Image (cartoon, coloured by chain):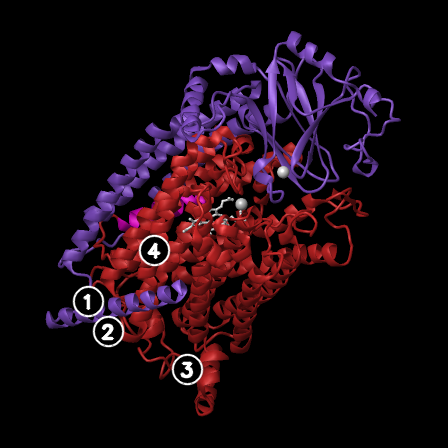
Amino acid sequence: MTGLMMVVVLFLAVFAAAQIMRIYELSVKVRQEEEYVVTDKDNSNQGRLMLLFGIGLIVAFFWMVAAWDKLALPKPASLHGVQIDQLWDISMGLIVVMFLIVQPILFWFAYKYRGKKGNKAIFYAHNDKLEFAWTIVPAIALAVLIIYGLTTWSNTMNPTTDDEPMVVEVYAQQFKWTARYAGEDNTLGYANVRLIQGANTLGVDTNHVNSGDDFIATEIHLPVGKPVVFKFRSQDVIHSAYFPHFRAQMNCVPGMETHFQFTPTVTTAEMRQDPNVIGKVERINAIRSAKGLELYEYDYILLCNKICGSAHYNMQMNVIVETQAEYDAWVKEQKTISETL
Amino acid sequence: MASHDHANDHAHDHDHEHHVENFWTKYIFSQDHKMIGKQFLITGMFMGIVGVFMSMLFRLQLAWPDQKFAILETFLGKWAPEGQMDPNMYLALVTIHGTIMVFFVLTAGLSGTFSNLLIPLQIGARDMASGFLNMLSYWFFAASSVIMLVSLFVETGPASGGWTIYPPLSALPQAMPGSGTGMTLWLVSMTLFIAGSLLGSLNYIVTIINLRTKGMAMTRLPLTIWAFLVTAILGVLSFPVLLSAALLLMFDRLLGTSFYLSDIMVAGEMLHNEGGSPVLYEHLFWFLGHPEVYIILLPALGITSEVIATNARKPIFGYRAMIGSILAIAFLSFIVWGHHMFITGMNPFLGSVFTFTTLLIAIPSAVKAFNYITTLWKGNLQFTPAMLFSVGLVSTFVAGGLTGIILGDSALDINVHDTYFVVAHFHIVMGLSAIFGMFAGVYHWFPKMYRRMMNKTLGYWHFWLTFVSAYGVFFPMHFTGLAGLPRRYYSNAEFPIFDELQDINVIISMFAILGGIAQLIFIFNFFYSMWRGPKAPQNPWKSNTLEWTTPVEHIHGNWPGALPEVHRWAYDYSKPGYDEDFVPQTTPLKDGEVAH
Ligand code: HEM
Ligand SMILES: [Cu+2]
Ligand SMILES: [Cu+2]
């Protein structure tokens, strides 16, 4: 019934609109002009609106930056993350400047050169010098960005460290993460999904020489300042291991192993003392207590960032960065695979 | 000369056909390019309404996740019990929204409409090289649209793996309900779509190369035609690769092959597949996927060049540079696909190469933007609704293109890949720019299509509401992306760190609803004007191009007598020495007049 009502109302609305249009068009006819012809008045109104919009866009831009900048991720918690953020700031600075130059010019021209009867546009078809200039200037700016960007990329993807990185496997499946540490020999035992059986949910080859000291965890613990190389595997579909606080991300692809190495530099405890993070947590907890939700304490997290099925939106694991002593104590509590399987 | 005579013969043939024309051959199985263009437009608009409506449904979910909406149950039935959307349905809506907008609206709807309408009219041809293939191209598209819509109603829901449908997710019905029958239909639909698109593209290329009228040198072509030509070439070179990707996926799904599958255990079942790689699919997909964004964008840019020049009453600035940049963009677009795959585990060195080529694209893009702006400089701007949308396009092209410089940089992409920052970027640079170009085209060439004028005042309202809500929807998404919010999340409530983004999500959704409603103005204006709008004069915008030399009434073969002869380029606006501020391409050069 409501459906029928909606259809009737819709129909009446369209009918009313059509009638209003008729009347409007008749009134235009009486004034003996064609409605579609753009008059000087239209041009000057629309030109003004363009200017107004241009101003509004710039004001809104600054308003958003002022209001929402604080929502961005806090400072990077990894060595290479600092470099990425520097590159980010420089690139962002450059494009924001371009945005703030080009948009106002566009809307200003739209306003300034709004048409008037009797005006004539200039006949200006090309200017080789000008075109050369705006080919070469972006080219130089981009050359700088490319060189800087590729250096950062290469430092990030092929890091050189004095210590041998600690090896941790991150195993993805619909819709959870599991970590496997390489143990004392710092080498993961062979594993393949085909070996999954009963409690051996990661398919570890228990006879393999390196697997006995491996241990499995539901949280990632990392000692601060020590490089770690993550090896990613997936059991079913593509997932993406996204560590936003460390500026790190890598897909987990079934049938192949991927990896990403970084060095965490800020412990979870230190990060919780960061003024930005304190502010964030306060704001979040204000929202949560108003809703009667459990209060939140800041933690680094690992999220899934490649669509992987219905619960893709809730595939997460905590990451805890701690001092070497705390880490060692945690490792002691863990049971190795030879003990559990 | 030869082509000239041939075209006259062609007109003769048509005289004979005239007698047998009935409702079916005129409106349904038409082989007339003008009618086929209109068929593409109407179908594309219908799909657009479906696609935008879907985005409003999932925006309701994102802004007010705990609220129940009766309207959701009305439309989604069992997928929204008591008005609470199911996560699988959320993913399905996002997927079909993306597919429809990218392929059905902005590829077929945009390119299909205006390539068909304008290529013969602007190059001075009687029709497309092959009217029959042209008709087939539309009917493949129509069939694929129907199948895509039918897939919405299957028991297990439509395809839900994102518009990129990466396997294994899309290959395994066990992995999500949408990967069942819905996915099969998606693949069938896209196969037909690609076939149609190839037929269309080949026809466009052949027509532009062979059927230009006397005097219409390549360097006198309007930029619209250049854009359509290059778009068609991109399509011919890249769509077959998507077709092969889709076929291999179909084999994996139906015949048990292992192109993309290896070592998989899903829903407790160990699969036999071994040796395949999902990364292979990603390469094949993006080999189309990246050129695809230019297949979408170039026609919009072409339309804008034409509309801006006409309404600025000024030649397009840097005509040759514009052609050069179209060609440069097209060439580069084939060697940048890897920027979608920086973090797939691809060799980092390869990532460097793709970063390099990607950032190069910024140069021809910048040239285009600056040339548009210079075209406005010291013009005599006539703000028709089409002109407003074109200026809007330049604004969004700049705003969205700039963030491409960030995303193309592999080191920076690591942390924003697949976040809302990307959603903001591609909607602004591709979605908005192309939609604005499409609107500009409809307002500008409506009189050519329907012999009547659209209402200007409603056009103004439509533009301003759309422009404001477009920025209102997509600009704030940059900020949620910078907070690390991943896309394709049904709900953000599982992560307390995202709690403080909820206000932004509400703002975005309100603008989305406003923007959606504003489109009703357009739809009303479109259909009202089609039947009741004032009669169009022959050349309402005082334009130089050939389509405005045809009679207002549509005739088969476009020109009643001989084909027009072209004596100059398309951009002699406000040329010194002429009283009028436009000089049609058919006007011979005066004694001693220099060609532009
Ligand atoms: C009212 C206007 C629109 C709104 C509110 C809207 C909103 C959205 C949102 C929120 C997403 C989902 C992001 C995610 O979770 O991944 C999305 C996805 C997408 N949209 Fe739109 N959009 C609109 C118009 C358009 C247009 C004009 C295009 C044309 C290019 C477009 C193309 C896409 C594509 C390709 C996707 C990705 C789909 C996928 O991830 O599989 N949208 N849109
Ligand atoms: Cu996942
Ligand atoms: Cu791309």
> Whole-percent x and y of residue B264?
76, 43
Whether residues under marks 2 and 1 lie with C-beta atoms below 8 angstroms apart, the answer is yes
Kind of residue sitting beneath label 4: Ile
- Can you identify the residue that label 1 sits on? A35
Q: Does residue B369 appear to the left or right of A293 in the view shown? A: left
Q: B315 left or right of A241?
A: left
Q: Which chain is purple?
A: A
- Looking at the rendered image, the quarter that the C terminus of chain B falls into is bottom left
Picture quarter containing residue A177? top right
Chain letter, red: B
- Secondary structure under tag 4 reads helix
Q: Are marks 3 and 4 on the same chain?
A: yes
- Viewer-nearest residue: B415 or B307: B415
Q: Nearer the viewer, residue B566 or A310?
A: A310
Viewer-nearest of labels 3 and 1? Answer: 1
Instruction: Looking at the picture, tell me which residue is in the foreground, B175 or B106.
Output: B175
Q: Earlier in the sequence, mark 2 or mark 4?
A: 4
| Chain under callout 1 | A
In percent of width and height, residue B524 lies at: 31, 65
Q: Residue at x 48, y 32 (%)?
A: A143
Q: How many marks?
A: 4
Circle 4 Cα neighbour tier, 10 Å, few/some/many (<14 / 14–19 / ≥20): some
Q: Which residue is mark 2?
A: B534
Q: Chain of mark 4?
A: B
Residue occupied by mark 3: B556
Pointer 3 chain? B
Provide the residue designation for mark 4.
B517
